[in-house]
């Protein structure tokens, strides 16, 4: 088992979405079902928490400060002064927000899913800082990991029940030519969140698989980081040098959760991450 540390010990029901905020020098992560946005400064050890009014699927830094939130009823903006306003509101009964990522052009690619995880009940949409919304995919079950290759020409995407990581050609804010990048075999869990490193390798968190996997740009599995708790949800590189791999976990539905279940974990010196753009809005 690869050496890991507990960065933030917390009993998150559904920890998700680790994101390094380079300007603030902190790691952002969330508890979807706990409706909480956490921050963690690995240098000072300082921690913060924001309680949201509804389930939150993702929280990403904004250019100029603040956060963009993928919420149950749409996408909202938190200002540097802690104010809140809706950027795009779209209430769909039985549906909630899930994972999201900021594209190289500063737009937010935000996923949704039904609470009952019904096939076709979710979407992936692109939202600009002006509030313009375009549906990229409209036949999704559990919209999860989104990430881009170092040059921005490829977009990786996970709809978890498919057990696949797919790849698209990405140009001009559009994703086309969908094809399979990697297949997660039966019994290894379901792909959840992902991140892409500086070498173009794709790291995939495995829900029910107690692990994070790294795939080469050719789709070959070349590394497995095993963890002691089964519900591994997402991963991202952080720290001043972007060399530490932060991993979120969950404890929802576990009858005898491991002591670290729900905590934010870190694998120091796991690789080299890519700087992540802030939301341009």
Image (cartoon, rainbow, N blue to C red):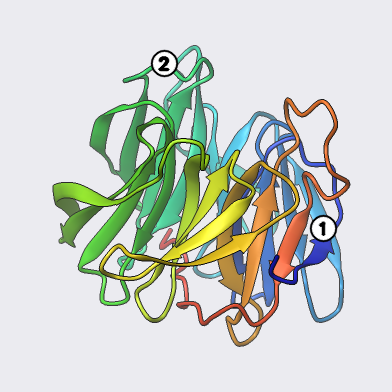
Q: Which residue has dot 2 on it?
A: 118
**Picture mark count:** 2
Disc 1 target residue: 48
Residue 218 appears in view: yes
Name above or below for residue 9 compared with residue 12: below
Residue 176: percent from the left, percent from the top? 13, 49
Report, in whole angstroms, how far the alpha carbon at label 2 lies from the one at label 1: 34 Å
Task: Return the residue nearer the eye: 201 or 70.
Answer: 201
Quadrant in which the C terminus appears: bottom left
Q: Is residue 173 visible?
A: no
Q: Nearer the viewer, mark 2 or mark 1?
A: 2
Residue 83, compared with residue 143, is above or below; it is below
Q: Residue furthest left?
A: 177
Label 2, residues with CA under 10 Å away: few <14, some 14-19, many ≥20:
few
Where is residue 249 shown, x and y percent of the image?
A: 69, 47
Q: Is residue 27 left or right of residue 202?
A: right
Q: Earlier in the sequence, mark 2 or mark 1?
A: 1
Q: Quadrant of residue 81?
A: bottom right
Q: What residue sits 44% from the left and 54% below the top?
A: 101
SS category of the residue bearing label 2: loop
Q: Quadrant of residue 185?
A: top left
State the SS at label 1.
strand
State the residue at coordinates (37%, 19%).
Answer: 121
Whether residues under marks 2 and 1 lie with C-beta atoms below 8 angstroms apart, the answer is no
Question: Residue drawn at (57%, 72%), measured in percent from left and top?
Answer: 237
In this view, the residue in front, 84 or 107, is 107
Residue 171 lies, with reference to residue 140, above or below; the image says below
The reply, left or right, for residue 15 in relation to residue 273 is right
């Amino acid at each position: 088992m690869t050496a890991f540390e507990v960065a933030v010990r917390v009993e998150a029901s559904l920890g998700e979405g680790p994101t390094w905020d380079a300007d603030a020098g902190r790691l952002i992560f969330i508890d979807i079902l706990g409706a909480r946005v956490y921050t963690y400064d690995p240098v000072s050890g300082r921690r913060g928490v924001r309680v949201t009014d509804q389930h939150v699927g993702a929280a990403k830094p904004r250019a100029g400060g603040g956060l963009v939130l993928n919420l149950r009823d749409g996408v909202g903006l938190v200002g540097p002064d802690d104010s809140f306003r809706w950027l795009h509101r779209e209430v769909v009964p039985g549906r909630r927000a899930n994972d999201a990522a900021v594209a190289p052009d500063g737009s937010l690619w935000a996923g949704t899913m039904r609470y009952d995880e019904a096939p076709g009940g979710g979407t992936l949409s692109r939202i600009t800082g002006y509030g313009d919304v375009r549906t990229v995919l409209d036949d999704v079950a559990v919209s999860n990991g989104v990430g881009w290759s170092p040059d921005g020409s490829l977009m990786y995407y996970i709809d978890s029940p498919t057990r696949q990581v797919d790849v698209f050609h990405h140009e001009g804010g559009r994703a086309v030519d969908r094809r399979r990048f990697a297949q997660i075999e039966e019994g290894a869990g379901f792909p959840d969140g992902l991140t892409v490193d500086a070498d173009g390798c794709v790291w995939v968190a495995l829900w029910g698989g107690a692990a994070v996997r790294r795939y080469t740009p050719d789709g070959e599995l070349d590394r497995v980081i095993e963890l002691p708790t089964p519900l591994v949800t997402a991963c991202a590189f952080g720290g001043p040098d972007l060399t530490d791999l932060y991993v979120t976990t969950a404890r929802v539905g576990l009858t005898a959760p491991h002591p670290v279940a729900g905590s934010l974990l870190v694998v120091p010196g796991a690789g080299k991450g890519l700087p992540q753009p802030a939301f341009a809005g």
